[in-house]
Image (cartoon, rainbow, N blue to C red):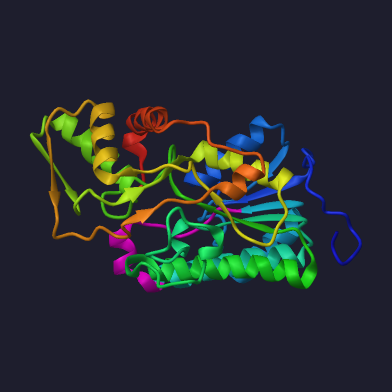
Amino acid sequence: MASDGVDYTPGKLDRDATFYVAGHRGLVGSAIRRRLESAGFENIVGKTSTELDLKDRDAVFSYMQQIKPKYVVLAAAKVGGILANSTYPVDFLSDNVRIQTNVLDAALRNDVERVVFLGSSCIYPKFAPQPIREDSLLTGHLEPTNDAYAIAKIAGIMHTQSVRRQYGLPWISAMPTNLYGPNDNFSPTGSHVLPALIRRYDEAQKAGAALVTNWGTGTPRREFLHADDMADAVLHLLEHYDGPDQVNVGTGSDVTIAEIAETIARVTGYQGETAWDTSKPDGTPQKLLDVSKLSEAGWTSRISLEEGLERTVAWYRDHVGALRD
């Protein structure tokens, strides 16, 4: 119950209400849009980055006032892998803080009832106890290769929590593990590890290459969640969860980078050898999320890693000529 007397107890959302998905063309946003469409939502809106620059505060406020959404999912962000985060920390910090602040402030100004802010598992300390619980936030040092991005996402969590405290609105934050799927960034220099590996092994398979060389040692452990599972979790949280703490979204299990590389090689049909360039950084040794809170809210992942990779490789091959660099 909010301070204005309105009952915000979670329940089935209004399928006729305006639902704004910020970042609706990206990996997560496009999956959320597909999930909302399949659930019967009739008025899902969004703008591409060329149509609406979310870093432009006046433009964001004007758009939000125009559409007057009842629900908002903030899936828009500047994202990238270790190389991009290490090379352009100012961009990752500044762009993301501006995007988040503009969208959340505009949502508050226009009385948006329910908001989900999407963060990242990199918000947690580099050496947080595994699996990582939500209360590990701000208990230790961040991974240096993406600390600027992590700080921006932490600011978004605090912004969401502050709206709850000051205005009593049932806004929530969800922290996904490593995501993959259709509309991912497969750039060889700007992508995360899984799409980068898909591109690398697919190109090697087509070229008949005898050797693929990957960064690091292959020993770090990572958890991967298909974007369609993430989208399903977001809708479930909107209809079943209302709490101040961010909610981890993942599978509850992880694999080594070497194991994921082996699986991708098999799915792509690559027959050559794999080597590891140990002069390159590994990043955090392990990032496995504790998903107890999500399980208690009644949701678990459904798409296996093997199935998800097969679907993603098929999508990549169907769209390889039109992918962003």
| Residue at 82% from the left image edge and 50% from the top image edge | 9
Q: Position of residue 121 (x, y in %)?
A: 46, 57
Q: Position of residue 229 (x, y in %)?
A: 53, 37
| Quadrant assignment, res 234 | top right
Which residue occupies the foreground of this view, 5 or 64? 5
Quick one: quadrant of the N terminus? bottom right
Q: Which residues are magenta?
A: 74-90
Q: Is residue 286 magenta?
A: no
| Quadrant assignment, res 190 | bottom left
Q: Position of residue 216 (x, y in %)?
A: 20, 54
Tell me if I can see residue 59 in this picture. no
Query: Left of 277 or right of it: where is 59?
Result: right
Which residue occupies the foreground of this view, 306 or 227? 306
Tell me if I can see residue 214 in this picture. yes
Q: How many marks?
A: 0
Query: Left of 312 or right of it: where is 132?
Result: right
* Residue 273, above or below 280: above
Q: Is residue 83 magenta?
A: yes
| Residue at 79% from the left image edge and 69% from the top image edge | 167
* Residue 153, above or below 266: below
